[in-house]
Amino acid sequence: MPLLAALPMGALLLDHQQRIVDVNQAFLDLLGYPDSLVLGRVFHELFQDAHPERLTALLNSPEGHCVRMDVGFAHAVAGPRMASIAFSRCFSEGQDRPRLLSIVLGNPPQTDPDPLLARSADIVSTSPDRIALVDRGRRIKAVNDAFLRTVDRARDELIDQDVKNLGGDDQLTACLDRNLGPCLDSGRILIEDIRETRGDGAPRDAEVRLFPHHDAEGTITGVIVDIRDVTASRDAERRLLQSAAVYAATSEGVLITDAAGLIVAVNPAFTRITGYTESEVLGQKPNLLNSHWHPRSYFVGMWRLLSRQGSWQGDIWNRRKDGEIYLQKLTIRRVLDAHGKVVNFVGVFAARNHAPPRRTGHLIHYDALTKLPNRLLFESRLEHAIELGRRKASPLALVLFDLDHFAHINSSLGHQLGDQLLRAVALRLRGVIRPSDTLARLRADQFGLLFEEIERITEVEDIARRLQAVLCADLQVSNHQVFLTASIGAAIDVDMKSDRNALFAHAESSLRSAKRQGRNGLLISRIEPGKAGHEHQRLIDLLRTGLVKGEYRLMYRPRADLETGVHTSAEVLIRWDQEEIGTVPPERFLTLANESGFMAELGEWELAMACRQLQHWLGKGFAIGGLSIHVSEAQLTRGNLIQILERLLVENPLTANRLDLEFNESLLQKHPEQIAGVFDGLRRLGVSITLNDVGAGWTSPAALRRLPIKTLRIHPNFIESLPESHDDLAVVQALVAMAQALDLEILADGVRTDEQRQLLLTIGCQQAQGALFGEAVFAPHFEHRLDPKPCSFPHNALEN
């Protein structure tokens, strides 16, 4: 199941006999074993307290609910360990019997934070850590053998002495002075790193952990001090940081791929040498640098030697992003794990000061695949055309076009047939343009056309339509019939005031807008100096005055119970009807609000209006559970969200749990400290929290367990393709299982059909949004939906 490899948490798949049939690397890391020792094993052979009878019951359950177990296992190196694992019933493609998808939620919750899992009398004498029990009077009540060896004293010399006798090092004494009191008072586990000097005078790194110690009644009676020598790991971290600094600072380009040959990291020198940024190459194969100068046999020999010896060194001609061909001195090494399995390939290269041979002169300026001019030559001709157009006062147009969904076609047919298709496209396009026009392949499936000496503006649209028409005619590639469409964006510089970069920016903007129209879109923009910037600023001004003029309105998108169809609550969406220009698309004005610093103010207004509307509906006796409101990044980072909510709850006497604030999953990783503070404040107030678009960013179960989240909302991308996509189904099953194991509610967004509704019910999902339950409407229309009677299925959205 390809999905397992993408999951960040440990995951495995069990067949109907509870045998492990698939496992991801995160789970293998948890066990410490290679997959060859795991696959085919029965689950309870590897894990203690696995309760196979509960798994059998789950496999036979028609409802496919979640089962959670805390199991023990023996790590290959570290010895006994524990893990919390959630199981859910699922079906794999091509299988008629159910299987069990299992995901690791983390370590089991500890009922006793004592690291020794025992009373003071049972301190483990064999532990390499120095461990001691200190009472409330700072007196030592117990120590283990490791402590005695370190201080070179007998046990009876330390018992009932002050804690300062645990070591002669001032750093350790100061650490204990700082933390003993707070640990006793708060009952929290405290951790601090120190650098201490022992009897031999050598500095050592240590991690000092203080755990509150409880008696049988749960009263805190002392503190367990656990001091772990971490010198080796800290030295390794320092060496790693030094290596990272060298990696970042070296003048040589560094490229790292995974075992499959996909790029996972590059250093700044790589970008400087090749012109490609890290974001452009991650997940790509290194052959995007291919100059097509070397024959295929050259690379076959390279990889044969690399496989046999583990490294290869030599010269290679590659191509920069701008199309320039250059010579590299390249060294490739493979990286093996402890089991001899290839995990990475590392390439280190430097550009050599050699001009390409005369034979490659054509390749410097022409695309090797299509034989069209490349971007380097195209930009050179564009600059020349701009100069000529200014002298002649003759307009020109830059036309950019992308083949729609070419990546999907390429992956379906295979890259070789994809290359044949691009050559056929280039041949067709040449037959449409004038001899004076320049047609180029700029990158992958994007082409550019330089259209000079325009007599009429309509000429640009005519040529664009001809390009689309010739592409729409079906193409025969080998034995495959392919139907193509292209999205086209063009910029016409009538006054010839724009430079090359400005022309490209306008054409690319038009292309993006054309793509939003759907397949075969076309948009031609006419450049007028200063107009774009003026319009942008005018819209920002209107954005702010719109709040004063009352131009914003709220719409309400229902949430429903999946089983009954009853509308339980609603999501709040903001809309802008500007009096001069009409309805402004949300993606446009919300982007402007973020860019202009207006988003926090607009979000506060939305929150206030939603509270007022909810109070109005409840006052009229409408059956609505609550409203869900999005919180923007600007509202989160401003720091006054909790105070605003406190004021609104006073102004609108609502039960706080009727408000549900939605946060995008990405904010958890981007602003962890602010999230922790805000979530704690919301928990205090009793406001519910929903995590949006779960599945897109893969927040770990451990992070979710620590936060007071009530609901996880599954990203609609995973719902829309159900039930056809088995991979998306497996993702949804994993998310539902995780939510059930963490005692969270789960909401599926994007439900369109009754078939999807029934499937989600079977998986264990409780709530949903989507066209099946009705689209967003304004408040008066939404009131008609506030009827407690369940809707029938299949259900069509209510008319406005």
Image (cartoon, rainbow, N blue to C red):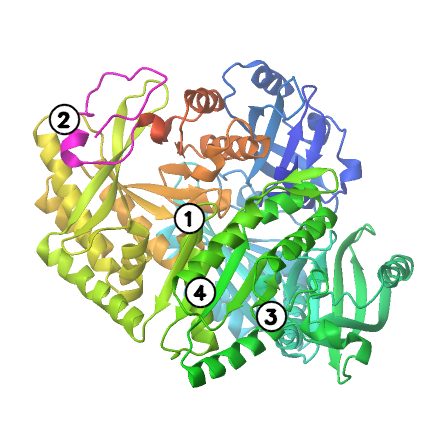
Task: Check residue 782 for magenta coloring.
Answer: yes
Q: Quick check: can you spot residue 54?
A: yes
Q: Nearer the viewer, mark 3 or mark 1?
A: 3
Q: Are marks 4 and 2 in contact (CB under 8 Å)?
A: no
Distance of mark 3 from mark 1, alpha carbons? 38 Å
Question: Which of the 4 quarters of the picture holds residue 277?
Answer: bottom right
Alpha carbon separation for disc pair 1 and 2: 32 Å
Q: Is residue 120 magenta?
A: no
- Identify the residue at horizontal 44%, vertical 21% (top origin): 761
Q: Earlier in the sequence, mark 4 or mark 2?
A: 4
Numbered disc in front, either 4 or 2: 4
Q: Nearer the viewer, mark 4 or mark 1?
A: 4
Mark 1 residue element: helix
Tag 1 near tag 2, CB within 8 Å = no
Real-space Cα separation, disc 3 to disc 2, in angstroms: 62 Å
Q: Which residue corresponds to mark 4? A: 507
Q: Dominant secondary structure of the magenta stretch?
A: loop
Residue pointed to by mark 2: 622
Which kind of residue does numbered mark 1 sit on? Glu
The magenta span reads 774-800
SS state under label 4: helix
- Report x, y in % for residue 204: 63, 71
Q: Amino acid at mark 2?
A: Phe
Q: Nearer the viewer, residue 554 or 619?
A: 554
Amino acid type, residue under disc 4 in the picture? Ala
Mark 3 — residue? 375
Q: Quadrant of residue 53?
A: top right
* In-front residue for pair 70/327: 327
